[in-house]
Image (tube, rainbow, N blue to C red):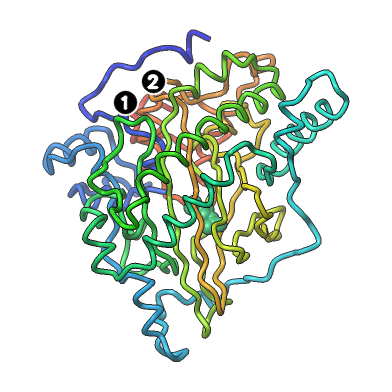
Amino acid sequence: MELHDRSIKSTALSFQSLPLALCLRLRTTKLIKKMGVHRHSSSGNVTVADLKRGMEAQGRKRTQLGGSLPVPNVQSLAASCHSASSVPRRYIRPELDAAADVSDQLPVIDMGVLLGDQDTPSARDEAAKLRSACEEWGFFHLVNHGVPEEVIEQMKAAMEGFFSQSLEDKLASSAQAPDSLEGYGQAFVVSEEQKLDWGDMLFLFTQPPNMRNTNLWPTHPPAFRAALERYSSEVKKMSLALLMQMGRGLGLPAERVAELFEDCVQSLRMNYYPPCRHHADELLGISSHSDATGLTVLLQVSPVPGLQVRRSARWVPVSPLPGGLVVNVGDVLEILSNGRYKSIEHRATINAEKERLSVAAFHSPRADCLIGPLPELVKEGQERYKTLSSEDYVRLVVSAKLDGKCLLDSMKVSSSQSYAVLGESFK
Ligand SMILES: O=C(O)CCC(=O)C(=O)O
């Protein structure tokens, strides 16, 4: 237990409080390029010294990690695409198999039943269903979740109001700084060659309140800020209660889960995917990825399908359930649970006729936790993942070439990958 409670001293890199959420799908090339650091080995690894030099040289602050290369605003681009040939090739993925397998359906968990009288057979059955959803799927619909409908409706209206403004107005209140992920713009564009996602995002830190960069929070519609604040705190409260139930499935006492997640870092990624009449089956709103954080709560704002979850070699569509939320296990939870709970790849497809909006709320454990299998969940020394301080985990996330689940794979004890980025001794 002591392992996971240890406080981590701040380093020159100041990664201690860099939230894992910030590092969602950050890619080394981008960071290194921006920091003026060159890869120094054929394996593509960089050392801590390289990172330090680069950061010092550029005088970057932690929250400046992770800007994207400049790319067009997709909402404006879509409005000007009147023929198949006007969709730029960088967005088109001819090899994409957008077809989904509708024979499988995500489990549905009822939070009301889960939190009801624990001694009833129905509560026990729901707890077993939750455990199996986390072990087998890594994804589930959550109904009766307790986030008030009015809070959800206000959040939806706030997002619709923001994205329906002119590009100038969206940029005026919330434009990303060139070297930052936070704000309105794009993420994870690291090279001029890579395929681009058909979507724009507004990415904001929401918890703890002292991490908020409120100068990027939209001022229109006028109710945006209040809606975001309420949504953020209701979703955080619900997530903690759900994490306690998920912890129970692993045999963890509620206090242990609270210790890890009560002071969690939460960020929200609000997605806008315009329709595309001409190439919908060859576009992705978000490329396939697993979430580098702990627990994600997704609100599908529009009643338009688009989310797909990988199951074996197939893609299962996740259509919105009225009043429901979609929850998924992130990489950190898979690691903490020593592989019992699964972090699964997912992606978003594009509709030919209708726009689609969604908002993902990412929750990471408090910043001074170790990221590794919880000792009490490791049987007979069988740790399946390495243990890193959260600052080293962040360093690994930013150094990994993110591609599906390759980051998580590299955290496996069975992986032969060494981490030059974490120093020569770390294998
Ligand atoms: O829009 C969706 O359904 C998926 C969003 C997502 O995966 C993300 O924001 O990371």
Q: Earlier in the sequence, mark 2 or mark 1?
A: 1
Q: Quadrant of residue 172?
A: bottom left
Horizontal and vertical percent position of residue 75: 38, 72
Q: Residue placed at 53% from the left, 18% from the top?
A: 258
Disc number at residue 16? 1
| Element class at badge 1 | loop
For label 2, the crowd category at 10 Å Cα-Cα, with few meaning under 14, some 14 to 19 and many 20 or more, is: some
Horizontal and vertical percent position of residue 144: 69, 40
Residue that numbered label 2 is attached to: 368
Report if residue 288 is visible in the image: no
For the residue with label 2, is its CB less than 8 Å from the closest atom of ligand 1?
A: no
Asked whether the residues under the numbered discs 2 and 1 touch, taking CB atoms below 8 Å apart as contact, a structural biologist would say: yes
Q: Residue placed at 77% from the left, 54% from the top?
A: 105
Disc number at residue 250? none
- Farthest residue toward the top? 2
Q: How far apart are marks 2 and 1 (CA)?
A: 7 Å
Q: Which amino acid does label 2 sit on?
A: Asp
Q: Residue placed at 52% from the left, 24% from the top?
A: 372
- Farthest residue toward the right? 121
Q: Which amino acid does label 1 sit on?
A: Gln
Horizontal and vertical percent position of residue 359: 49, 52
Q: In this view, does 75 lie above or below 310?
A: below
Q: Which of 203 and 345 is in front in this view?
A: 203
The reply, left or right, for residue 139 in relation to residue 421 is right
